[in-house]
Image: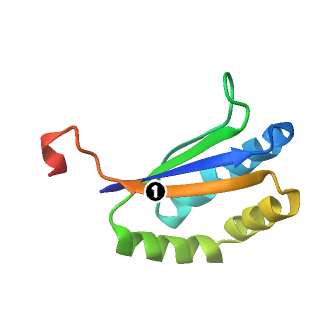
């Protein structure tokens, strides 16, 4: 199992737009096969950092999931929404493997 961590740098004046974006992924990601942990918007401290976190079986499953997400009507709408509103200034994605349990090896 891999966990995908997405770090977003967002326009702090468009936090509400990011929250709408997050809610849309809250519907689309599970429907397309991702095990969504959650999307997190700024609350206290940094006004520009936000996160998305979900689990996926492996990188091959990730590629299939991404194809389903790109074909999903809400997924398409959400990508277009982000491009139109331009509230995401930067997006960094990394995949990590849980290392703190014996089952992780």
Q: Residue at x 80, y 51 (%)?
A: 87
Q: Position of residue 58 (x, y in %)?
A: 33, 66
Which residue occupies the foreground of this view, 27 or 66? 66
Position of the N terminus by quadrant: bottom left
Residue 26 vertical position relative to residue 69 in the rendered view, above or below: above
Residue pushed farthest top? Answer: 44
Q: Which residue is mark 1?
A: 94
Which image quarter: residue 42?
A: top right
Q: Position of residue 29 (x, y in %)?
A: 56, 58
Instruction: For residue 33, say whether it is visible.
Output: yes
Q: Residue at x 68, y 46 (%)?
A: 9
Which residue occupies the foreground of this view, 76 or 94? 94
Q: Position of residue 32 (x, y in %)?
A: 53, 66
Instruction: For residue 23, say whether it is visible.
Output: no
Q: How many marks?
A: 1
Q: Residue at x 81, y 61 (%)?
A: 81
Q: Residue at x 73, y 32 (%)?
A: 47
State the colouring used for the structure image.
rainbow
Residue 11 vertical position relative to residue 91 in the rendered view, above or below: above
* Left or right: 7, with 9 as reference point: left
Q: Residues within 10 Å of mark 1 (few under 14, many from 20)?
A: few
Residue 89 vertical position relative to residue 66 in the rendered view, above or below: above
Label 1 residue SS: strand
């Amino acid at each position: 199992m891999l966990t995908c961590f997405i770090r977003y740098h967002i326009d702090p004046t468009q936090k509400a737009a990011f929250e709408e974006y997050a809610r849309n992924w809250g519907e689309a990601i599970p429907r397309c096969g991702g095990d969504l942990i959650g999307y997190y918007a700024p609350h206290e401290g940094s006004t520009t950092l936000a996160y998305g976190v979900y689990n996926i079986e492996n990188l091959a499953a990730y590629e299939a999931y991404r194809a389903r997400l790109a074909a999903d009507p809400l997924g398409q709408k959400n990508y277009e929404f982000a491009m139109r509103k331009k509230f995401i200034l930067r997006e960094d994605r990394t995949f990590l493997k849980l290392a703190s349990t014996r089952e992780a090896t």
